[in-house]
């Protein structure tokens, strides 16, 4: 009879239970992850322990209100929720006490797409963009934490609340920023966190106020990028260098915390002193040498060598090299120091006038040939130049390669010295006497001479004679009969006999005649008179002039 009554009572209780209703139950057991609650049904219900804000605050025997989601599941147990009962019970209370713009405290329950679920008595949605000033990438780190939040939107029909943590943070930062702007002064030293790094500097968070630390204010030395000295998240000490209250901008500096190395620069690096430093940069015009942090000197490309022509600094130095140099000049205001390497050794040109006086006979090796002359190395670092005009008394040399080649050992005479310009003029022809100075003793009009044809032109033959003298046999002086083409009868290298019929010492020209070689005195005198009437520009052009014309014609 008793069992029948119990079954009737259980059936009656189940009949009174309704889904989606709130009932009062008694905690009968607390397990590690769940709480067992007796609501008077034929079986007890189970609620996850996570639904209790603080599981340590509840005990066995406590009366609690729970939400009946289902009267009975497949196992015959009621499906209960403590959290939903609290939310349903609290919803009206939340609406009365909480309006849009109100500040509330909430505990993060879990992560959903686009943000977090926060319990503020009821579930509210905290979007990712509203969690912090910058949207976090890892939302799991916030689960279980409690934050102050601002209610930004309430949808009563859908029972939906959106909250923001970011708005409170920004409001707090704004208050802090105004307070800091009112308190700090230029010269103030404060600590901050590196918030962001760019190519031109870093933004430092001064506990709510962002300041710009420009790359030029990070160190007195040279850096290429701020990340060489800073990293995001580190705490640094900075000095306030400028404040713009209207734009709420603050400029910061690190190097200003230390003494400017240029303040006593003249005492540490007096002009003329020797220094050691490291090559930190090479540019087309020279090399920058770091003497100490924040102090660099420039070795201009002209200060590398007394004698060698340096085209680019990389021919001599590399970045990272340790070098010794001499301080040449200091411009403190421009923060410039001029250095020199060549000053470490003696300038060989200082002794040039002593070692190679004008008129001295010297010997050297042909180092280089140019269109206008040959450079002869007299000693290491000292070259003299033999101009083409100083290679022969009697012939016009068009290119030094006609007489010299690179590597030849040559004798010469010092003609002129310009130490300041590092120039020594040399001459080869000055080793011998100018034959034209004593031409009267070498040749006289009427002399029979023998020579070799050096060149054939349309108007005559150029003949090389003794003593480096050239003579011209005009086409009219070949024979008694007119000759149309000299190359039909002569070739270069042929030996010819001729007679001197004209000597012009001023113009350094010698006229010859083949046909007059057999003339008697009277016929010779007549031929000389006839020869004088021939235009000098036509028949007495010297060999060098013709070679010039031929060379120019070939180049054109």
Image (cartoon, rainbow, N blue to C red):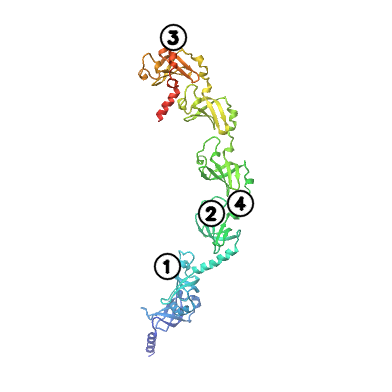
Crowd around label 1: few <14 · some 14–19 · many ≥20 (10 Å): few
Disc marking residue 114: 1
Q: Earlier in the sequence, mark 2 or mark 3?
A: 2
CA separation in Å, label 1 and label 2: 38 Å
Q: Is residue 401 above or below residue 96?
A: above
Which of the pair 26/185 is nearer the observer?
A: 185
Q: Is residue 65 above or below residue 5?
A: above
Q: Is residue 49 above or below residue 509?
A: below
Which of the pair 54/439 is nearer the observer?
A: 439
Residue designated by label 3 = 522
CA separation in Å, label 3 and label 4: 100 Å
| Residue 528 in the image, given as x and y percentages of width and height | 44, 14
Quadrant of the drawing holding the C terminus: top left
- Disc 4 element: loop
Disc marking residue 133: none
CA separation in Å, label 4 and label 1: 52 Å
Q: Earlier in the sequence, mark 3 or mark 1?
A: 1
Q: Earlier in the sequence, mark 4 or mark 1?
A: 1
Q: Earlier in the sequence, mark 2 or mark 4?
A: 2
Q: Residue furthest bottom?
A: 1
Determine contact: label 4, label 1, CB under 8 Å.
no
Residue located 45% across and 16% down the image: 532
Q: Earlier in the sequence, mark 3 or mark 4?
A: 4
Residue designated by label 4 = 260
Of tags 1 and 2, the one toward the viewer is 2
Determine contact: label 1, label 2, CB under 8 Å.
no
């Amino acid at each position: 009879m008793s069992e029948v009554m119990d079954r009737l009572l259980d059936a009656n209780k189940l009949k009174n239970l309704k889904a989606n209703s709130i009932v009062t139950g008694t905690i009968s057991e607390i397990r590690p992850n769940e709480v067992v609650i007796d609501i008077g049904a034929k079986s007890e219900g189970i609620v996850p322990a996570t639904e209790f804000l603080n599981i340590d605050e509840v005990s066995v025997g406590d009366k609690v209100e729970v939400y009946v989601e289902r009267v009975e599941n497949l196992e015959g147990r009621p499906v209960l929720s403590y959290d939903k009962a609290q939310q349903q019970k609290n919803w009206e209370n939340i609406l009365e006490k909480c309006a849009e713009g109100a500040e509330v405290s909430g505990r993060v329950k879990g992560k959903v797409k686009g943000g977090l679920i926060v319990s503020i008595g009821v579930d509210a949605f905290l979007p990712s963009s509203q969690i912090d000033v910058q949207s976090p990438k890892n939302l799991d780190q916030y689960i279980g934490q409690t934050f102050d939040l601002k209610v930004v939107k309430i949808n009563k029909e859908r029972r939906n609340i959106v909250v923001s943590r970011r708005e409170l943070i920004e409001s707090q930062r704004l208050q802090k920023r105004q307070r800091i702007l009112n308190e700090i002064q230029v010269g103030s030293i404060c600590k901050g966190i590196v918030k962001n790094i760019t190519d031109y500097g870093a933004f430092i968070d001064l506990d709510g106020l962002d300041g710009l630390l420009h790359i030029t204010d990070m160190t007195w030395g040279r850096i290429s990028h701020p990340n060489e000295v800073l990293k995001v998240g580190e705490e640094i000490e900075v000095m306030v260098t400028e404040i713009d209250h209207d734009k709420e901008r603050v400029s910061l500096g690190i190097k200003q915390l230390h003494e400017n190395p240029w303040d006593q620069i003249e005492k540490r690096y007096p002009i003329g002193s020797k220094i050691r430093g490291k090559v930190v940069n090479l540019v087309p015009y020279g090399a920058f040498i770091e003497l100490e942090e924040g102090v660099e000197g420039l070795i201009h490309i002209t200060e590398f060598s007394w004698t060698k022509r340096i085209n680019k600094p990389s021919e001599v130095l590399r970045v990272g090299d340790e070098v010794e140099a001499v301080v040449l000049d200091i411009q403190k205001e421009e923060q410039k120091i001029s250095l020199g390497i060549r000053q470490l050794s003696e300038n060989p040109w200082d002794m040039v006038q002593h070692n190679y006086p004008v008129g001295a006979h010297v010997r050297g090796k042909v180092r280089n040939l140019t269109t206008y002359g040959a450079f002869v190395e007299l000693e290491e670092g000292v070259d003299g130049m033999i101009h083409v005009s100083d290679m022969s008394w009697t012939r016009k040399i068009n290119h030094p390669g006609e007489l010299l080649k690179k590597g030849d050992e040559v004798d010469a005479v010092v003609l002129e010295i310009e130490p300041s310009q590092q120039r020594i003029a040399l001459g080869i022809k000055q080793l011998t006497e100018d034959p034209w100075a004593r031409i009267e003793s070498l040749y006289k009009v009427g002399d029979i001479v023998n020579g070799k044809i050096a060149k054939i032109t349309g108007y005559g033959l150029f003949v090389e004679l003794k003593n480096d003298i050239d003579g011209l046999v005009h086409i009219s002086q070949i024979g008694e009969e007119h000759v149309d083409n000299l190359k039909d009868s002569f070739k270069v290298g042929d030996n010819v006999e001729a007679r001197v019929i004209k000597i012009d010492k001023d113009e350094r020209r010698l006229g010859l005649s083949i046909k007059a070689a057999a003339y008697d005195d009277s016929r010779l005198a007549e031929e000389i008179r006839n020869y004088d009437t021939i235009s000098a520009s036509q028949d007495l052009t010297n060999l060098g002039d013709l070679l010039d014309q031929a060379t120019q014609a070939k180049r054109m």
